[in-house]
Amino acid sequence: MFKVAVPILPVESSERAEAFYAEKLRFERVYAYRPDPESSDPAWLGMVRDGAHIVLSSFHPDGPPGSASVQFYVEDIAGLRQELASAGIHLGDDQVFDQDWGNLEFNLEDPDGNRINVAQDKSES
């Protein structure tokens, strides 16, 4: 049986990506695999925030940076948007979109151009 899906986000520099996800999005690195201890890349980094898991990979078979998208469902979209803006993340326009399919959503990109969609079920707001 399926247990959980973990998106793999391709990145150019594991150090730059880890800094963004840890310092700006407040994910915590739970593991790192680097086959060459003398080099920071290529790397495979497991990152977690609350119950959300992602992998940041600078291994080329995982795709070119900027080619991935991920959607995170959250409990308090307005609070998280404010937190991210306070952390210096450029969020574009100042709105949360009220989608016809029942979500409140906003979007951002990581330093490698991977797209991040943040969503909250309107019935939980």
Image (cartoon, rainbow, N blue to C red):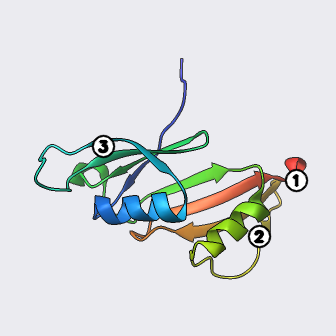
Q: Which residue lies furthest to the top in this view?
A: 1
Q: Name the residue under label 3.
A: 32
Q: Between label 1 and label 3, give the one nearer the viewer.
A: 3
From where the camera sits, is residue 51 visible?
yes
| Residue 67 vertical position relative to residue 90 in the rendered view, above or below | above
Residue 34 on image: x %, y %: 20, 45
Q: Nearer the viewer, residue 44 or 50?
A: 50
Q: Which of 97/17 is in front?
A: 17
Residue at figure coordinates x 76%, y 62% from the top left: 79
Q: Can residue 64 be seen in this view?
A: no
Find out whether the residues at labels 3 and 2 contact each other: C-beta distance under 8 Å: no
Closer to us: 110 or 99 = 110
| x and y percentages locating residue 119 in the rendered image | 71, 56
Q: In the rendered view, does 6 fall on the left or right side of 122?
A: left
**Mark 1 Cα within 10 Å, few/some/many (few <14, many 20+)?**
few
Give me the residue at 52% from left, 65% from top. Answer: 24
Question: Which secondary structure, mark 1?
Answer: loop
Query: Could you say which disc has been placed on residue 96 in the image?
Result: 2
Q: In which quarter of the image is residue 103?
A: bottom right
Tell me if 125 is positioned left or right of 81 in this view.
right
116 left or right, relative to 20: right
Mark sitting earlier along the chain (3/2): 3
Asked whether the beta carbons under mark 1 and mark 3 sit within 8 Å of each other, the answer is no
Which numbered disc, 1 or 2, marks the residue that appears first in the sequence? 2
Mark 1 sits on what residue?
A: 125
Residue for point 55% across, 60% down: 25
Of all residues, the one furthest to the bottom in this rendering is: 93
Instruction: Say if 4 sits above or below 13 in the image.
Output: above
Q: Distance between the residues labelled 3 and 2?
A: 34 Å
Q: Which quarter shows the N terminus?
A: top right
Residue type at the position of mark 2: Val
